[in-house]
Image (tube, rainbow, N blue to C red):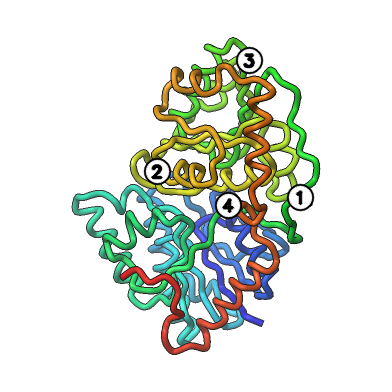
Amino acid sequence: MLHVLYLVHDVSDPAVRRRITMLRTGGARVTLAGFRRTATPIADIEGLQPIDLGATRDGRFAQRLAAVAKATFSIGSKLKGAPRPDLIIARNLEMLALARRARSAFGATVPIVYECLDIHRLVLRDDMLGKALRATERHLARDVKLLVTSSPAFIANYFKPFRQVAAPVELVENKYFEAAAILPGERESMDAPAAPPWRIGWFGALRCRRSLKLLADFTHRMDGRFEIVLRGRPALSEFPDFHAFVDAEPYLSFRGPYRNPEDMAAIYQDVHFSWAIDFFEEGQNSEWLLPNRLYEGCRFGAVPISMGHTETGRFLSQQDIGILLPKATPDALETALGTMDEQRFGRLKARVLARNPRTWSYDRSDCSALVEKLRRLTTMREPLATAALA
């Protein structure tokens, strides 16, 4: 059985739980180690007891660097007693630095996989800081065996033009994990709630102040015909007044966190549309990503709303589904949605449901294929040939 040491920047991140589930479903054994964004250590993630590397704070880059520097000296003792892994997966750049220290602590040549699912705005700066960070990434990634990323636009706009990583690339999209394979026509009933009011669900990492303001302005224009349901983890480092803002808005409601995958069907089937727009790092990461909410919403029949010029918009255009906005304004939203009726919504929803479910979901066979690809890295002298950057 392949034994993976998974080093992560935030053990409580729901995406970490999803990756652990995929690895274990595919037949791998996982040891989890990482930082946390909580005051006290986290006792359990999917039945695993994480090896705690300390606390970091969202949006505090300098503090995170200091925590990583401190962990480079302690990671050997932290991993003492853990069995030697067959493979190390480092999620994000700071964990790539620790992966090399961890490998040294085990005193063996252990392949490293670099998992990068976001391109931080700091590495895209054209000043000394940005250049230094890119140089650091190139140095740390010089001998990784595989780069795992989630969007073709990350490769086309960052990894390839900057030539950051020479390793082959594995595209693992942010799809919903399906415990059992489903085929077209086999889905459960996905009736949307009665309308109006029409409900737009914005779920997941809530970090975009501009989206919040845009949706609030739009609902005022519609005078209650549209409501916004927010669920997930608001980034209070980006808008510390999040809760006060939402509480003051008559057509916005925040309904707290949710469990993935346990709550996904319920929360998406309670809305008509899913908000798949993010201006947090406009023109960069937010324009290039294919977010979790894109796949999750479509899997459960919510009609996605996106900007037409983004990677998400291009993806939806290829699938011929969704609402694509030309501009991020209340006027554009009113033009696209203001005259919505049951017949039009029925057509939009039917197009989403007509797509092959595998467009939105990974199942057990995908997990097994991923783990087998990782296992081959431990036995091959040369990197596995997938989609090379060069």
Please state which amino acid type lies under the numbered disc 4: Asp
Please state which amino acid type lies under the numbered disc 3: Arg
**Which one is in front in this view, the residue at disc 1 or the one at disc 2?**
1
Q: Estimate the spatial distance between the alpha carbons at disc 1 and disc 2, rounded to whole Å.
A: 33 Å
**Which one is in front in this view, the residue at disc 1 or the one at disc 4?**
1
Residue at label 2?
Answer: 287
Q: Position of residue 32 (x, y in %)?
A: 60, 67
Residue at label 1?
Answer: 185
Q: Residue at x 45, y 22 (%)?
A: 332
Viewer-side residue, 32 vs 365: 365
Q: Label 4: state its secondary structure.
A: loop
- First along the sequence among labels 1 and 2: 1
Q: Position of residue 257 (x, y in %)?
A: 66, 39
Which label was assigned to residue 225?
Answer: 3
Residue at label 4?
Answer: 13
- Packing grade of label 1 (10 A; few <14, some 14-19, many >=20) is few
